[in-house]
Image (cartoon, rainbow, N blue to C red):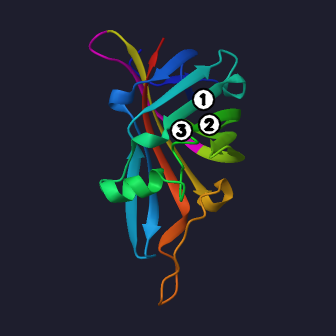
């Protein structure tokens, strides 16, 4: 399989179970700092599975988790603060989890994935926008699929409420967090 699979007018992940390959994937985020710049980070350890149903996307499922202690923004002091009880409280809540409840085809390989996101044992439904970027067989004969996923959340809805107001107005850390996931998954 070297091209995107098209079925009933849909570019889709071919049916089967696919595991995210952490060596070729990233789970990242970005948030405003001082309301003027953007800080980016990622989680270094994560797991994800796609169960692409033969019957179509509406029968498919997506699950994933990240290890909070592996957060990396490129600044060790900031990372320690993010692991602390002020933010993620990694010791008490070691994982962030997501499990889909609905997958809908939009058009041309684009999907809406609704599901439950759990941070600090607080769960809310979050809609993610996914694009199937391609399907290929790698040089070792393994089927791979590439998917880009984007979403946005208000961190305060998940108990991430630490904040510092700025003397000139505004906030030290933005409340809106953009989620950026780029996946290479292999068929199992």
Region of the chain picked out in magenta, as a range: 129-140
Asked if one can make out residue 174 in the rendered structure from this viewpoint, the answer is yes
Across and down, in percent, residue 125 comes to 71, 46
Across and down, in percent, residue 36 comes to 41, 76
Residue 68 lies in the magenta stretch: no
Which image quadrant for residue 145? Answer: top left
Specify the label residue 37 is tagged with.
Answer: none
Specify the label residue 63 is tagged with.
Answer: 1
Look at the numbered disc 3 and give the secondary structure of its residue. Answer: loop
Q: Are marks 2 and 1 in contact (CB under 8 Å)?
A: yes
Looking at the image, which residue sits at the far left? Answer: 139
Across and down, in percent, residue 94 comes to 53, 38
Kindly identify which residue carries mark 2.
Answer: 98
Q: Indicate which disc, 2 or 1, sits on the residue closer to the N terminus.
A: 1
Residue 130 lies in the magenta stretch: yes
Look at the numbered disc 2 and give the secondary structure of its residue. Answer: strand
Q: Indicate which disc, 1 or 3, sits on the residue closer to the N terminus.
A: 1
Looking at the picture, does residue 51 appear above or below residue 95? above
Looking at the picture, does residue 15 appear above or below residue 128? above
Position of residue 51 in the picture relative to residue 142 (left or right) = right
Kindly identify which residue carries mark 3.
Answer: 94
Looking at the picture, does residue 165 appear above or below residue 104? below
Q: Are marks 1 and 3 in contact (CB under 8 Å)?
A: no
Position of residue 3 in the picture relative to residue 101 (left or right) = left
Across and down, in percent, residue 83 comes to 46, 50
Q: Residue at x 46, y 76 (%)?
A: 35
Q: Residue at x 38, y 38 (%)?
A: 44
Q: Nearer the viewer, residue 58 or 39?
A: 39
The number of numbered discs placed on residues in the rendered structure image is: 3
Q: Are marks 2 and 3 in contact (CB under 8 Å)?
A: no
Q: Nearer the viewer, residue 125 or 120?
A: 120
Asked if one can make out residue 9 in the rendered structure from this viewpoint, the answer is no
């Amino acid at each position: 399989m070297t091209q995107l699979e098209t079925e009933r007018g849909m570019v889709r992940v071919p049916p089967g179970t696919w595991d995210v390959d952490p060596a070729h994937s990233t789970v990242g985020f970005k948030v405003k700092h001082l309301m003027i710049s953007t800080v980016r980070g990622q989680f270094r350890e994560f797991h994800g599975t796609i169960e692409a149903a033969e019957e179509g996307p509406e029968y498919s499922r997506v699950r994933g988790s990240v290890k909070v202690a592996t957060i990396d923004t490129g600044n060790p002091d900031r990372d320690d603060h993010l692991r602390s009880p002020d933010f993620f409280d990694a010791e008490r809540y070691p994982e962030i989890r997501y499990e889909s409840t609905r997958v809908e085809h939009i058009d041309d390989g684009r999907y809406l994935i609704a599901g439950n996101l759990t941070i600090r044992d607080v769960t809310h439904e979050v809609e993610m926008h996914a694009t199937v970027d391609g399907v290929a067989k790698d040089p070792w004969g393994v089927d791979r699929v590439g998917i880009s996923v984007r979403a946005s959340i208000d961190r305060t809805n998940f108990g991430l409420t630490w904040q510092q107001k700025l003397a000139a107005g505004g906030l030290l850390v933005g409340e809106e967090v953009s989620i950026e996931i780029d996946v290479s998954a292999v068929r199992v």
